[in-house]
Amino acid sequence: MTNTIVSYGQEPEVKIRQSASTAITVAYGDGIGPEIMKATLKVLEAAGARLDIEEISIGESVYLSGNTSGIGQEAWDSLRRTRVFLKAPITTPQGGGYKSLNVTTRKVLGLFANVRPCVSYYPYVSTKHPVMDVVIVRENEEDLYAGIEHQQTDEVIQCLKLISRPGTERIIRYAFEYAKVYGRKKVTCFTKDNIMKMTDGLFHKVFDEVGTEYPEIEKEHCIVDIGAARLAETPEAFDVIVMPNLYGDILSDVAAQITGSVGLGGSANIGDGFAMFEAIHGSAPDLAGKGKANPSGLLLAAVQMLVHIKQADIAEKIHNAWLRTMEDGIHTADIYDAGVSKARVGTQEFADSVIDRLGLKPENLPAVDYSKGNKSINVTITPTKQAVKELVGVDVFLHFSERDPEQLAAKLAGIESAGMRLKMITNRGTKVWPNGFPETFCTDHWRCRFTNDPQQGVSYQAVVDLLQRIHNRSLEVIKTENLYLMDGKQTFSAGQGQ
Ligand code: NAD
C-alpha cells in the first residue's frame, strides 16, 4: 500500500490508497462541491477504486486571492503529472475580469470532447420523458467560448465565434467513433447553418463528409432551434447528438434536467492524454452546507473516470449499485417524489446507501456492463490542405456616431486604392448603403466593404494605403477583415439584403 498524498490547501477528507493505483488530481470545489466530492470519494473507496489522490485548491478562494484564472501553478503541475482530473463544481465570482476556470482548463489541456450522457430512470425517478437515453457530445474548445470579446464603439461589443476545420473534424469523428464503440444507432448534428452559413456551415459540412465513413450509423441534421424543441418534447427520438460548444452547453443542461434533475448528470471532458470528469451542474450556492445536494452527477462522472483509467470492474460495481439505489427509492430532495420515492436522504446518507448496495445489480432498470473495459476512442484528423489565397479587398469597420449611412458614404467618397472602392456599407450586418431602407436602425458601428470591380487581386500595401486615406479623413478605423478568394472561391459573407 502506498500512502503518498500531495495536498495543496485543503486537508484531504478521504484517502484512497491501493497497490497498482492510478494517480488522479481531485478538486473539492465550491458551494456543494466539498459535500458531493466527499460522498463520491467515500463510494469510490468502499468499492475498492485503486487511486492515488493529489488534491488541489481551485476556484473561488484562488480567484479572491487575486489570481484571475482561479487556478495556480501547483495545481497545473499536479494535472500535468496525473493527467486525470476529478473536479467538483466551482463558483466563478461575478465581475472583476475573472476568466472561467472550466473553460480555461478544457482549453489549456486540450479537452476537445465533452461527453454528457442523459438517461431517464423511469418509473423510479419522476420525469415527463420515461424513455430517454441521449448522449450529448459537445465541442469543448471553440465557438463563442474562444472568449475573444472587444468593445469597439460606444454602442457595440463583439464576441468572436471561431470554428476550425480540425477542431470540427475531431469532435465529429469522436461522436461517430463513440456511437460505433458503444453500439449506438444514430448521430444527429445540431447547427444554425441557415444563418451562420460559413461557421456552422463548416460544422454541418464536416458532419456530412465524416458521416459517409460510417454507413452503419444513421445520420441526421437539425437546425438547432427546432432540434432543441424536439429534444425537449421527444428525447426518445435521439441517440447521440453532436453540437458546437454553445448549443451543447445549453442543451446538455436541458437534457439532464428533463431526465428528472440536473443533479443526475455527469460528464467527461476528453483530450489527447488528458481527461477531466465533473458533474454537469454548478456549485448550487443555494444548497451549500445543507447536506441536501445530490452527489449522483459527480459520482457518475467518477464512473466515467474509472472506465477511462481502466478500472471498469469498479466502475460497473458502483454504477449498478447506484442504479439499485435509484430503484429502491432512496432519493435526495431534488428527485424525491412521495409517489415513487421510499426515503428522502441527504448527500452522505445517499452515498452510504450506494455503498450498502455495492455488489448488487438493479432488478428492473438495465444493469450496466463495462466488461469490455475501457473502449478507447482514438481520432485522427486529416492534414490541412493549403489553398491558394488571393486578397481581393477589405472590410473596414468604423466608429461613426452619426446614424446616417449617406453621411458616412459622403465622407468616404472618392477614396480609392489599387482600384478598391467603397462597394457597400452595412450596420450590424444589414446593408444600409447603397439603396438602404430608411427604416433600418443604425448604431455607431459600420462595416465598409472595399473591393474592385470585377474582383481581382490586390496587395496588402494597397489595403494599408486605403486605411491611411480613411484615417486622413478623420474617420476612426476600429478593425479590418481582409477579403480573400481561396482556390478561386469567395470566402466572405454578403451583407444582409445585398
Ligand atoms: P447550478 O447548476 O449550480 O444550480 C442550478 C439549480 O440546480 C439550483 O437550483 C441548484 O440548487 C440545483 N442543483 C444543482 N446541482 C444540484 C445537485 N447536485 N443536487 C440538487 N440540486 C442541484 O447553476 P447556477 O446556480 O447557475 O450556478 C451556480 C454557480 O456554479 C455559478 O457560480 C456558476 O458559475 C457555477 N457553475 C460551475 C460549473 C462547474 O464548475 N462546472 C458549471 C456551471 C455553473
Image (cartoon, grey):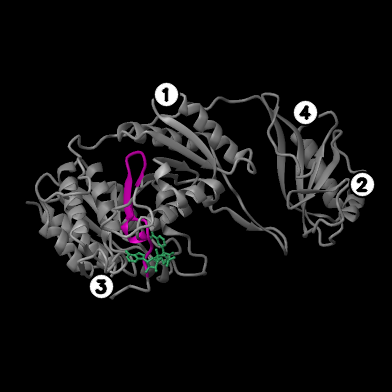
Mark closest to the chain's N terminus, 3 or 1: 1
Q: Residue extending furthest bottom?
A: 290
Q: Are marks 1 and 2 in contact (CB under 8 Å)?
A: no
The reply to whether residue 12 is visible in this rendering is: no
**Residue denoted by label 2:** 413
**Residue denoted by label 4:** 457
Quarter of the picture for ligand 1?
bottom left
**Residue 155: where, in percent of width, then height?**
72, 63
Nearest to the observer: residue 192 or residue 26: 192
* Amino acid type indicated by mark 1: Pro
Say if 108 sits above or below 390 in the image: below
Foreground: disc 4 or disc 1:
1
Query: Left of 166 or right of it: where is 54?
Result: left
**Residue denoted by label 3:** 291
Quadrant in the rendering for residue 57: bottom left
Q: Residue extending furthest left?
A: 1
Q: Which residues are magenta?
A: 261-284
* Amino acid type indicated by mark 2: Ala
Say if 221 sits above or below 63 in the image: above
* Disc 1 crowd, CA 10 A, few/some/many (<14, 14-19, 20+): few
**Residue 56: where, in percent of width, then height?**
28, 60
Could you say whether the residue bearing mark 3 is in a helix, strand or loop? Answer: loop
**Mark 4 and mark 2: Cα distance apart in space:** 22 Å
**Mark 4 and mark 1: Cα distance apart in space:** 42 Å
* Amino acid type indicated by mark 3: Gly
**Residue denoted by label 1:** 215
Foreground: disc 1 or disc 2:
1
Mark closest to the chain's N terminus, 4 or 2: 2
